[in-house]
Image (cartoon, rainbow, N blue to C red):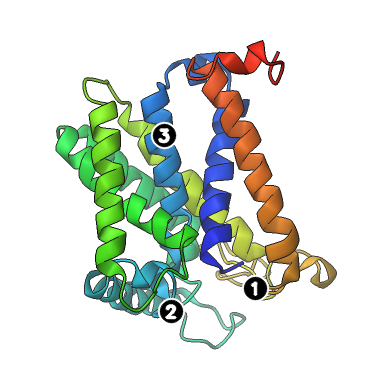
Amino acid sequence: MATGPTHAISGLAAWAAVTALASDGTVGQLSAQSWVIGATLASGAALLPDIDHPSSTVTRTFGAISQGLSKAAVTLSSFIYKLTRTKKDSDRDGGHRGFTHTIVFALLMGLAVTAIVQASNGTATAVVMFFYAGLAIRGIMHKWCPKRDAMLIAGASLVLTALCTWWASGEEHNAAIFGLAVIIGCVAHFLGDAITSQGCSMLWPIPIAGKTWYPIRPPEVMRMSTGGKVEMKILLPLLTGAAVIFSAVVAYRVGAAPWLADIGLIS
């Protein structure tokens, strides 16, 4: 899948599912504020791997800045692909769906966010929040005047960041939780790409069938076309429903929505 909304919602659904299904002890470490920030990071991170494509949703998010990051990502990804490919790997440039579509990349991004938040004060958290909130907003509103809306995206991201920062003021955040949210969002992206025809070489550099860039994908009959009816009419609604249900469960468990039990939605 390559449409922005599906990627963004998949990140949110994955984050909500992981936190909803986690043990009570794990969820007990989460405040409602931390969960919301994590949800924003996961939703934005679910767009991040496509920074290796010059015309992707994420590349258009912050105008010239994200375009510059995209060029750097394409160059790095192509270099790593050519350096590590085997004779059995396909003969392609390795720019798109290369390094930024691997578990290694997801772990590095998660560690980077953890280190940034852990090593500084709340200002760093706000900067990280601003970046990933922009990606999430761009993903969900991918057709919002895409050629001229970098400032609009930045403005909306700034407002969301300011509101979350104000709401979470005085809260003690676990930096590792935010890093985990980014990893979850990236992995959600990989799984979405894995069910398309091209697949996703997320397990690089583990050699599989003599290939270091082995494309993980289901049998052909189970694959879907990017932006096709299966994605837009079936997968996106299912992911949206899962995100709502699991988010409600977490909201109840962290004490943000005790009224869900009163109306019989959660027992």
Residue 262 appears in view: yes
Task: State the image coordinates of residue 102 (x, y, percent, origin top left).
Answer: 49, 60
Q: Is residue 181 above or below residue 60?
A: above
> Which residue bears the numbered disc 1?
226
> In screen coordinates, is 267 left or right of 259?
right
Work out how far the residue at label 1 is from the one at label 3, CA to CA, in angstroms. 29 Å
Q: Position of residue 238 (x, y in %)?
A: 71, 49
Q: Does 203 appear above or below 166?
A: below
Rate crowding at label 2 as few (under 14), some (14 to 19) or many (20 or more) other CA atoms within 10 Å: many
Residue to which mark 2 is pinned: 95
User: Which residue is at 49% across, 18% downward?
Assistant: 254
Q: Amino acid at mark 1?
A: Thr
At label 2, which amino acid type do we have? Gly
What is the number of callouts on the image?
A: 3
Q: Horizontally, is 199 left or right of 37 in the view?
A: right
Residue at the limit of the structure toward the front, as seen here: 263
Residue visible at 21% across and 47% down?
Answer: 127
Which mark's residue is nearer the viewer, 1 or 2?
A: 1
For label 3, the residue is 36
Residue 203 in view: no
Residue 230 position in % (x across, y down)? 75, 66
Circle 1 packing at 10 Å, graded few (<14), some (14-19), many (20+), is some
Identified by mark 3, the residue type is: Val
Residue extending farthest to the bottom is 91
